[in-house]
Amino acid sequence: MSSNTIEMGRVNELLDGFGGRRVTILGDAMLDRYIWGEVNRISPEAPVPVVEVRDETVRFGGAANVAENVAALGAAADVIGVVGDDDHGRSLVDRLSARGVGVGHLLKVDGRPTTTKTRIIAHNQQVVRADREHAHALSGADEESVIASIREAVPAADVLIISDYGKGVVGERTLEAALDAARGGGTRVCVDPKESHFSRYRGVTAITPNLKEAAGAVGYAMATDDDLLRGGWELRERLDAECVIVTRGEHGMSLFMRGGEYAHLPTVAREVFDVTGAGDTVVSVLGVALAAGASMVEAAMIANHAAGVVIREIGTASISVDEIRRSFEELEEVAGG
């Protein structure tokens, strides 16, 4: 069992080292639209609530959210993926660029809409979600263009983060090219996985499935501590990963590391409003922390604090170094009485 404590001086040293790290993000870049309102009546046309719209906001999702998180942490972020030749795609590229994210490897694909999820929220509760997407795999010239971007960008990065939402960017050939480029350049690889692709992630540095994804990958429920341990070690062995990190919501996260080391990190969140995007935050912060010289447990602890901050907010959110620092300081104050 590894130690899951870290001194504040070490936290500050690592957080101060985030600036200037180079991170490439490969995956499904998405837009999350939120329509905010109130419900005061039921529609006379059908038994559904009528939402009186008060506001609309747009945030990043998937690989775009990971890239924004990385940039907000002070690291250099470069995202590889696709967008549609549409208003949502242009908005996504412009917004990422405005936040300092490198967008030169975001390929515009004709006839393929930019993946967009529209959520209608009333009284802080999601009423309905509408998705606009084509999830089929890339092929032909589009796939070749993404592979060319991978071969150019990945070897120059300190860390490659793969954000796989099953929307077609992370396929057999693109993933093979990414892992080959990472090995050739000595680039560490962190993966936010899609259950159906688990067999292809072999040899990565760290993979961060949630409990449901991990259970789906091993083929049985991980409802008990014994099942969790059995499944976590099975995944670690099967993937030959340096570490499998099973994120468990309000129960924190469990680390299964090469060499037989195990660590469990309890959640630091005091309130949970929305877990949307928490997985993006975990893999973003984990990757940047590893690039800054953190051990796997140290990186996971920092990511755990970051996740505890973002799930206090509704919708996806980026996290800053100062917010992570304050989270550690608050925990120290509680521990000190």
Image: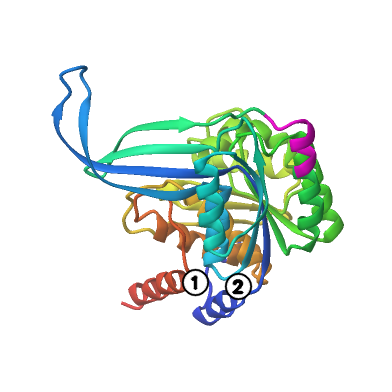
Residue 273 horizontal side relative to residue 321, left or right: left
Foreground pick, 188 / 226? 188
Q: Is residue 138 above or below residue 76?
A: above
Q: Answer whether residue 140 is magenta in the image.
A: yes
Residue 134 horizontal side relative to residue 267, left or right: right
Q: Answer whether residue 132 is magenta in the image.
A: no
Name the residue at the left extreme. Answer: 40
Q: How far is disc 2 from disc 1 in space, using C-alphas?
A: 8 Å
Three-letter code, disc 2: Phe
Q: Magenta part mainly helix, strand or loop?
A: helix
Specify the quadrant that holds the N terminus: bottom right
Residue under the image location 46 percent in, 57 percent down: 307
Specify the quadrant that holds the C terminus: bottom left
Rendering quarter of residue 50:
top left
Q: Is mark 2 on a helix, strand or loop?
A: loop
Q: Which residue position is annotated with label 1?
A: 321
Three-letter code, disc 1: Val
Residue under the image location 53 percent in, 79 percent down: 12
Q: Where is residue 214 in the image (x, y as percent from the top left)?
A: 58, 38
Q: Is mark 1 on a helix, strand or loop?
A: helix
> What range of the chain is rendered magenta?
137-145
Residue under the image location 71 percent in, 33 percent down: 138
Q: Position of residue 223 (x, y in %)?
A: 48, 35
Residue 291 horizontal side relative to residue 71, left or right: right
Foreground pick, 136 / 21? 136
Q: Which residue position is annotated with label 2?
A: 18
Q: Where is residue 153 in the image (x, y as percent from the top left)?
A: 76, 57
Residue 128 horizontal side relative to residue 134, left or right: left
Pointers 2 and 1 in contact (C-beta within 8 Å): yes
Q: Is residue 37 visible?
A: yes
